[in-house]
Amino acid sequence: MAKTVRLDIVTPDKLAYSEDVTMVIARATDGDLGVLPGHVPLIAALGIWPLRLFNDDGEKQISLCGGFIEVQPDKVVILAGCAELPEEIDVPRAEQAKRRAEERLAKHGGDVDVTRAEAALSRAMMRLKVAGFQSHK
Ligand code: ATP
């Protein structure tokens, strides 16, 4: 059986990633999903959580703002609202977004859209986590 699977990550504006990987671990809405080459076909919804992918260089992480994953034995396709490699993440921007969301949530005011602020906070925290991730073999 093949040792790798092709991973394509597609966002509204680009093909964010397209490489052969040995394993993918994604946070689906009903739990973590580990995908090795030859996995049975499935489709699952993804949460706002770093995608973990593995190749001969070790582990890499990519930020994903939710979306869908389609798994085939030789191919994994992820459709995501956004996806960023660690080097693409603007850390001061994510820190600002985190502060903004925390301030909105702290207000408890009637005009604060709590679900929206919580999602913004999750995206910002995920970006900061991915930007600070150190790969180890
Ligand atoms: P912000 O409030 O800073 O715009 P956001 O979470 O509302 O953050 P999104 O709506 O998730 O932003 O993303 C809009 C676009 O901006 C996407 O293309 C996303 O990849 C990009 N983006 C958002 N935040 C960052 C960041 N910190 N670094 C790099 N790209 C980012």
Image (tube, rainbow, N blue to C red):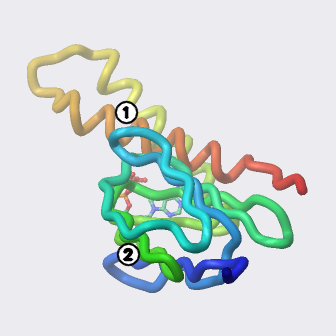
Which residue is label 1 attached to? 101
Location of residue 67 with respect to 9 vertically, above or below = above
Characterize the local packing of mark 2: few (<14), some (14-19) or many (20 or more) Cα atoms within 10 angstroms: some
Taking the spot 55% from the left edge, 77% from the top edge, the residue there is 7
Spatial CA span between label 2 and label 1 = 24 Å
The answer to whether one can see residue 33 in this image is: yes
Taking the spot 53% from the left edge, 39% from the top edge, the residue there is 125
Q: Residue 49, position in %: x, y?
A: 48, 46
User: The disc labelled 2 sits on which kind of residue?
Assistant: Thr
Pick the residue in front: 27 or 14.
27
Q: Is residue 33 left or right of residue 5?
A: left
For ligand 1, which image quadrant applies?
bottom left
The numbered dot on residue 11 is 2
Q: Residue 24, position in %: x, y?
A: 59, 61
Quadrant location of the N terminus?
bottom right
> Residue extending furthest right?
137
Disc 2 Cβ-to-ligand 1 distance below 8 Å: yes
**Between tags 2 and 1, which lies in front?**
2
Pick the residue in front: 32 or 110.
32
Q: Secondary structure at mark 1?
A: helix
Q: Residue 111, position in %: x, y?
A: 10, 26
User: The disc labelled 1 sits on which kind of residue?
Assistant: Ala
Characterize the local packing of mark 1: few (<14), some (14-19) or many (20 or more) Cα atoms within 10 angstroms: many
Location of residue 45 with respect to 42 vertically, above or below = above
Q: Is residue 75 left or right of residue 86?
A: left
Q: Is residue 46 left or right of residue 126?
A: left
Q: Earlier in the sequence, mark 2 or mark 1?
A: 2
Pick the residue in front: 75 or 97.
75
Taking the spot 60% from the left edge, 49% from the top edge, the residue there is 92
Q: Residue 27, position in %: x, y?
A: 47, 46
